[in-house]
Amino acid sequence: MNYPSINEQMDLIKRGAEEIIPEDELVKKLERSRKDNVPLVIKLGCDPSRPDLHIGHGVVLRKLRHFQNLGHAAVLVIGDFTAMIGDPSGRNKTRPQLTLEEARVNAKSYVDQAKVILDMSAAKIFYNSEWLNKMDFNDVVKLASSYTVARMLERDDFTKRFQSEIPISIHEFLYPLAQAQDSVELKADVELGGTDQKFNLLVGRDLQKDNGQEPQCIITTPLLEGTDGVEKMSKSYGNDIGLLETPEDMYGKTLSISDDMILRWFILAADSDPSTYQSAEKRLKDPKVNPMEIKRELARAVVSLYHDDAAAEKAEKHFNEVIVGKGIPDDMPSYSLSKEDLIVNVIFDSGILQSKGEARRMIKQGAVKLDNEKIDDMHATISPGTEQIIKVGKRRFLRIIG
């Protein structure tokens, strides 16, 4: 493998990173890797308790892809065993525990979605139940003895819960230790994670030292704020853009962010290079430039990253025709209707929305129209006849044929 120069590697590694700890050790690892022609083992742990991935998750996944592009070995650790504990990071209460079977089902969904970013043909995937499930009680006691309660309480979330007298279960202390054990098993050179994972990643360094291994370097990435610009991106907040969303939805949702989020999104959501970022930064300072122009560039960049340039152009055309021009697009999915049916069923069966519950919510919000007439009855039906158009929200259209 002909690895790029250290400077070239570090430039890409630093893009969108929050912290590199310690940076000088990472440089030494890269130098040795280049000299010996041996790739570094780059570990990313995945929490399968949250199977719906969005571009906020894409920030750290993209960092793993950066390392793949540099020729290093990407290792995805599916935390099917640790999901049974529940990651306490950033939580003000105990996270619900999953069964091993539930974690495995979610893990498959996680991997399928991560394919839009990672080169899965070159990535190694491990389930940490492979080694954690084999540990007996003596092993667990030995692992627990490697850290003190005082060290655990250095975690900000544990400290806040302790001071607020919110219960902390003993098993929650085991989560960072179990995650650290993953690093020992894999002999990780580098571990990636969001800023909320910093404590867990540092525990990995300590445990590797205790086991006579060279400690991993850690790289944290920022938590991307959602489209509301307030909370971190999350499906539960309704401010997310899913990794598998349509180009039209990605484009439209990106345009909804506030102007002060544009530059941050160029780096984290669009993975833009420094020259693109600097150009956007310079133009945003020019009072003659409308920020919407730059936001449109950002939206095209996000769609191109997760789909392609042609999809980005098509999404922008759709936005101009449907949202700006308030028209009906020529290109839309069709649904063949053979008999009278509930509109809720048609919306779900056509795949426009992922659940009937979501369809009912959209009707309740007044966001569903049939031939431009608002539907406000959950039990409203549609019958075969002439061609009809169902509009859901601002960007979804369905042509009814029957």
Image (tube, grey):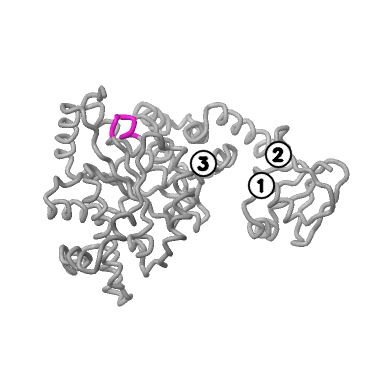
Q: Which amino acid type is marked by label 3? A: Thr
Q: Quadrant of the N terminus?
A: top left
Q: Earlier in the sequence, mark 2 or mark 3?
A: 3
Q: Residues within 10 Å of mark 2 (few under 14, many from 20)?
A: few
Q: Earlier in the sequence, mark 1 or mark 2?
A: 2
Label placed on residue 365:
none
Mark 3 lies on residue: 254
The magenta region covers 66-72
- Does dot 3 land on a helix, a strand or a loop? helix
The one nearer the camera, 60 or 268, is: 60
Q: Which residue is drawn at the image coordinates 40% and 38% (left, top)?
A: 263
CA gap, disc 1 to disc 3? 20 Å
Mark 2 lies on residue: 333
- Does dot 1 land on a helix, a strand or a loop? loop
Q: Position of residue 63 (x, y in %)?
A: 34, 39
Mark 1 lies on residue: 352
The one nearer the camera, 316 or 89, is: 89
CA gap, disc 1 to disc 2? 9 Å
Circle 1/circle 2 CB separation < 8 Å: yes
CA gap, disc 2 to disc 3? 23 Å
| Residue 158 falls inside the magenta stretch | no
Q: Quadrant of the C terminus?
A: top right
Please identify the quarter of the rendering in which residue 164 is found: bottom left
- Does dot 2 land on a helix, a strand or a loop? loop
